[in-house]
Amino acid sequence: MFSTIGLQKILTTQYDFWIPNFPTSKDLSNSIFSNYQSLLTRQLRLFNKFYITFLPHCNTSVSGGGNSIVSYFNSHQLLDSLSSSDLQSLQKKCIMFMDQLASIDGSYLSTWKDVKKQNPKANFKGPTPKWFQ
């Protein structure tokens, strides 16, 4: 069983990438948006260059949605990639999944006003972010 500190380090690495699961080798090879990276993140990225991967034996998945926004942007070539400021904005607003931005059936994008209502604990100060427009 992981110690509490070990589990926290794994979750911090997920937070660095803003993804709901432990990063895969594909995630590790993508450029990271954060200027600050945890030691574990830097080590995993280095090992990944030599095709060495690590997987935790415990489930660290974040529940709450289906498709992560970061994965969605990375998989669609027509979309601009997220900048570090976009990622920080998503983190501050606690928005990780596309489900948090779309209608219940996923057929259309919610209005910014509706997004703010659905996430009352998040920080929504200032104008509508560029990643949403």
Image (spheres, rainbow, N blue to C red):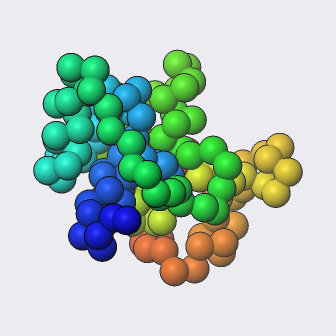
Q: How many marks?
A: 0
Quadrant containing the C terminus is top right
Percent across and percent down for residue 127 are 45, 62
Q: Position of residue 58 (x, y in %)?
A: 46, 57
Residue 84: x %, y % from top left:
29, 44
Residue at horizontal 54%, vertical 26%?
75
Determine whether, in the image, residue 68 is placed left or right of residue 111.
left
Residue 23 occupies which quadrant of the picture? top left
The answer, for residue 128, to whether it is visible in the render is no
**Residue at (54%, 44%) from the top-left corner?**
69
- Residue 28, image x and y in percent? 32, 33
Quadrant position of residue 11? bottom left
Nearer the observer, 97 or 83:
97
Mark yes or no: residue 108 visible. yes
Question: Is residue 83 positioned above or below 99 on the image?
Answer: above
Most extreme residue toward the bottom, as rendered? 121
Closer to us: 126 or 116: 116
At x 20%, y 30%, the residue is 47
Q: Quadrant of the N terminus?
A: bottom left
Work out whether 111 lies above or below 30: below
Viewed as shown, does residue 111 lie left or right of 23? Answer: right
Query: Going by the picture, which residue comes out furthest to the front?
Result: 1
Q: Residue at x 36, y 46 (%)?
A: 17
Residue 102 position (above or below residue 6): above
Quarter where residue 5 is shown: bottom left
